[in-house]
Amino acid sequence: MNAISELPEWRILLAEEIKRTSVTDTAKRIGYARSSVSLANGGKYTANTDQLEARVLEVLGGPEPTFYCPAQGASITKNDCVEFAARSMPTTSPRALRQWQICQSCEHREDCNNAE
């Protein structure tokens, strides 16, 4: 039997998200420290993993698929995409303006707007 198939579902989801993005992006997405996510992925997290497991399943294991958002530089759901795309043009932050501009021409924007 494959070693990855012996892991609990939350560890598989975590490993897949890290492989698809990065440890840092995955940590940001689930709201945990990068070091905690790295240790958990390597099976060396010494603290109780109940809360981490619940958060991974909540964020990564939901029924709604995710895709990579080039504006945010992270994986998001269609719901997140719709909310992000609905923002008005920012005028106070050059970084926020660049993100907004990327969002306006994104290939996913049409799909997300039609999801409503």
Image (tube, rainbow, N blue to C red):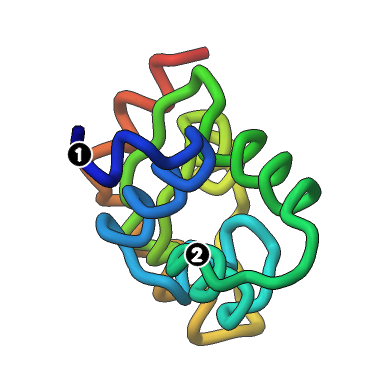
> Is the Cβ of the residue at disc 1 closer than 8 Å to that at disc 2?
no
Residue at 38% from the left image edge and 66% from the top image edge: 73
Of 39 and 62, the residue lying toward us: 39
User: To which quarter of the image does residue 40 belong?
Assistant: bottom right
Q: Earlier in the sequence, mark 1 or mark 2?
A: 1
Q: How many marks?
A: 2
Quarter of the image containing the N terminus?
top left
Element type where label 1 sits in the image: loop
Residue at 70% from the left image edge and 72% from the top image edge: 46
Q: Where is mark 2, residue-wise? A: 43
On the picture, is 20 further left or further right than 62? left
Of 42 and 65, the residue lying toward us: 42
What is the x, y in percent for residue 74?
42, 59
What is the x, y in percent for residue 108?
29, 37
Please state which amino acid type lies under the numbered disc 2.
Gly
Residue at 41% from the left image edge and 50% from the top image edge: 75
Above or below for 33 versus 42: below
Q: Where is mark 1, residue-wise? A: 2
Residue at 50% from the left image edge and 37% from the top image edge: 8
On the picture, is 16 further left or further right than 91? left
What is the x, y in percent for residue 80?
56, 40
Above or below for 88 versus 8: below
Please state which amino acid type lies under the numbered disc 1.
Asn
Q: Residues within 10 Å of mark 2 (few under 14, many from 20)?
A: few
Q: CA distance from mark 1 to mark 2?
A: 16 Å
Of 26 and 52, the residue lying toward us: 52
